[in-house]
Amino acid sequence: MKKLLVTACLVVSFFVLNAGSAAAVDNDVIKVGLRYGSSAMFSANLENAVGSGYEFGYYEDDRRFQPVGWTDETAISMTAAGEIYLDHSGAYTRTSSGGSSIGAWHVEIDGFGSFEDAQDTAWDYDGYPAWIDQEYVVRVGDYSTEREAQDAADRLGEGYAARSSNSGVLVTVTRTTEILFEFDCGGRLNLGVLPSGGDTVTWFRGYKYPGGFEYFRTNGGDLSVVNVTALDDYVRGVLPSEMGGGWPLAALEAQAVCARTYACRTSKHFSTYGFDVCNGIDCQVYNGLNAATDLTDQAVENTAGEMLYYDGYLVQDPVYHSSNGGATEDAKNVWGREKGYLKGKEDPYEARTSIPNYSYSVTYTSAELTWILEQKGYDIGTVRNVYVSEYTPTGNVAAVTFEGSRSNKTVTGLTCSSIFYSSTYGKSVRSLRFSINGGGPSGDGVYVNGSSYLSSFDGVSAISGTGTIQTLSGNSYTAISSSGTSVVSGGGSGVPAAPASGSFTITGSGNGHSVGMSQYGAKAMAELGYTYEDILHFYYTDVTIR
């Protein structure tokens, strides 16, 4: 039997994803999706927090606001035009509940050259001004049928029956049936609402937002609500949501640069939804300015205009996470795509600060894992074994193998943690830095270099003691290790072994995907006296800040 030093080279296939279809931010103005898709609203309220009144209009392609009307009211509601009901609580609904209503039909009088002219006539007829297909008209009354609206026009002696379309948006005084304005350009332009005055802040669903708002109806349905605001006002809102408002200034400054870079990268939402970034964890958490502090505002001001660049181009993925458990990770090992500025490295800083719930432990039974995998499309039979089958060079999990009664399944990258998530059981694995107790490779396989598990030697190349490279065959070899020589074998039986305890305990540390900047690591570095430039250069490889 020959003495062989067993080595293995693993080839990783990767691809670069197309980052999007439209550049975000124009004239330093960003569009943030607040409600859209399944969260779109039949009716959306606004109330002045700072300032008084609103302008109605639309946002041009360069994000400049073009006014077409106004109101002095401080609490207004935008509602999908059509048949509207007002329930006893003051909420607008599509179905009658015994309260008041706004009919979909109106008497329309056209031929006005300005909002003021339309407003004057609207007052005379107890109606309201509207901007329909980019023309000013006056609409009077609201009726359930065309016949009722035409009879009203006949009595008035002018006008004709007109129906609110499925692209129209009606503006009312909140919790009333008093109509202030109607906007309908057939979806070619979207209603914009801008608070009157200069430095304004507006309440929307319990949060105070800077800038203005945009409303549009997708396929004639509910309203998407978009906050249209200055880039740095957006970043002011992101910082206290992504970090604590009282965190060290250098950490907040590093976060400000990341948040601004993220906002200005190629948009993944614009072509689908009509805005640059969303307001949740799929993008960056943004809840207006409620939680902004003097420190977060100072961090934004101190880094004004600064972003991350790599190889002369704006960084497209300035990703960050809460904590990494001791080491960051290469993007290619997590998402399967290479990013030169997202390289994994040991992180000595997280251990220097206090991190809530830094360590975790969660136990799954075989039955629970079987059910979880089935729900995610992996039908491997009853789970009999689960173990970490590969680690990355920095010690994070690269692959997890499940052995079932019918087949086996190995997952890689971020799926190594996400596959364990179950809202039904209220369990999850929070990071990629963990170990699994209760399981282990079945049969007579072998670990190579402490990371890759081989169930067979077939096709493996090895360097012999004489320095020659040989392709292995057979099932048993002697390997040289730091402790001497030992016999290793491959080609296990492939029969999953039931865990002795019937359960598997996963113990880990950190929280998140481990790529890019650790937020708690940034906090630790700031507490140690490092600058935000130091923080960014540590967590992002070969970047420039400008």
Image (tube, rainbow, N blue to C red):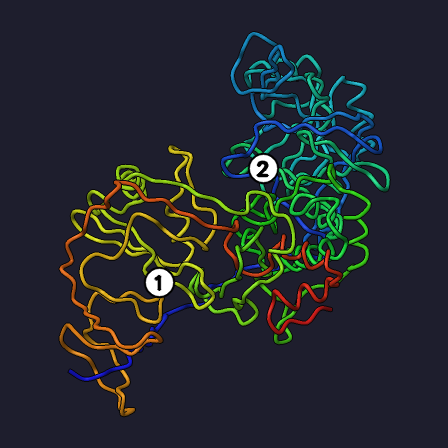
Judge whether 325 appears above or below 189 on screen.
Answer: below
Circle 2 sits on which residue?
A: 35
Could you say where residue 524 lies in the image, as x and y percent from the top left?
A: 67, 56
- Label of residue 59 in the image: none
Tell me which residue sits at (60%, 61%) in the image. 318
Residue extending furthest toward the top: 98
Residue 498, percent across and down? 20, 46
| Crowd tier of the residue under label 2, counting other residues whose Cα lies within 10 Å: few below 14, some 14–19, many 20 or above | some
Q: Tell me the kind of residue under disc 2.
A: Arg
Q: Report, in whole angstroms, how far the alpha carbon at label 1 lies from the one at label 2.
A: 41 Å
Q: Tell me the element at label 1.
A: strand
Q: In which quarter of the image is residue 22?
A: bottom right
* Amino acid type, label 1: Glu
Pick whichever of labels 1 and 2 is earlier in the sequence. 2
Q: In this view, does 145 lie to the left or right of 171?
A: left
Q: Mark 1 points at which residue?
A: 390
